[in-house]
Amino acid sequence: MEQKHVCLVCGKSFTEGQGIILTIADRKLEFHSKSCAYKFLKEVIMNSEKDCISSPLKDVYKKYSDLLDKREKIEKKI
Ligand SMILES: [Zn+2]
C-alpha cells in the first residue's frame, strides 16, 4: 500500500513521490506543493533570529552567486 502524506500547510493528502518532503532539525515536513512549502519556509525564515539566519544565508548566497559568476564566465568563452 502506498504511504499517504498530509500537507502541513493546507491539509491536502498526497502519495509518496508527489509533493515535497523535507527533514529539518529532526522534524519531518510534508508539503503537497512548492507553494505550500514556500509559504511555510518563508514564515520560518521570517521568524528566525537575524543572528541565526545570517550565517547560513550568507553561505548559500555566496554559493549561488559564485555559480552565477562561473556560468557567466563560461558563456563569455563561447
Ligand atoms: Zn498544501
Image (cartoon, grey):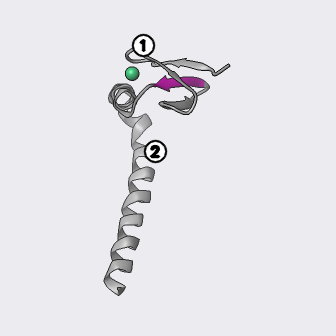
Q: Secondary structure at mark 2?
A: helix
| Residue that numbered label 1 is attached to | 11
Q: Left or right: 53 with respect to 72?
A: right
User: Identity of the amino acid at label 2?
Assistant: Pro
Where, quadrant-wise, is the N terminus in this rendering?
A: top right
Q: Residue furthest right?
A: 1
Depicted 54 relative to depicted 15: above or below: below
Depicted 59 relative to depicted 78: above or below: above
Q: Residue furthest front?
A: 1
- Residue 16, picture quadrant: top right
**Tally of numbered tags:** 2
Depicted 8 relative to depicted 65: above or below: above
Depicted 57 relative to depicted 78: above or below: above
> Which residue is found at the position 57% from the left and 18% from the top?
4
- Residue 9, picture quadrant: top left
The x, y position of residue 25, in whole percent, is: 57, 28
The x, y position of residue 44, in whole percent, is: 39, 26
Q: Secondary structure at mark 1?
A: loop
Where, quadrant-wise, is the C terminus in this rendering?
A: bottom left
> Does the residue at mark 2 contact the one at mark 1 (Cβ under 8 Å)?
no
> Which residue is found at the position 57% from the left and 24% from the top?
28
Q: Which numbered disc covers residue 58?
A: none
Disc with the residue nearer the chain's start (2 vs 1)? 1
The answer to whether mark 1 is within 8 Å of ligand 1 is yes
Residue range in magenta is 27-31
User: Identity of the amino acid at label 1?
Assistant: Gly
Which SS does the magenta portion mostly show?
strand
Q: Residue furthest top?
A: 11
| Residue that numbered label 2 is attached to | 56
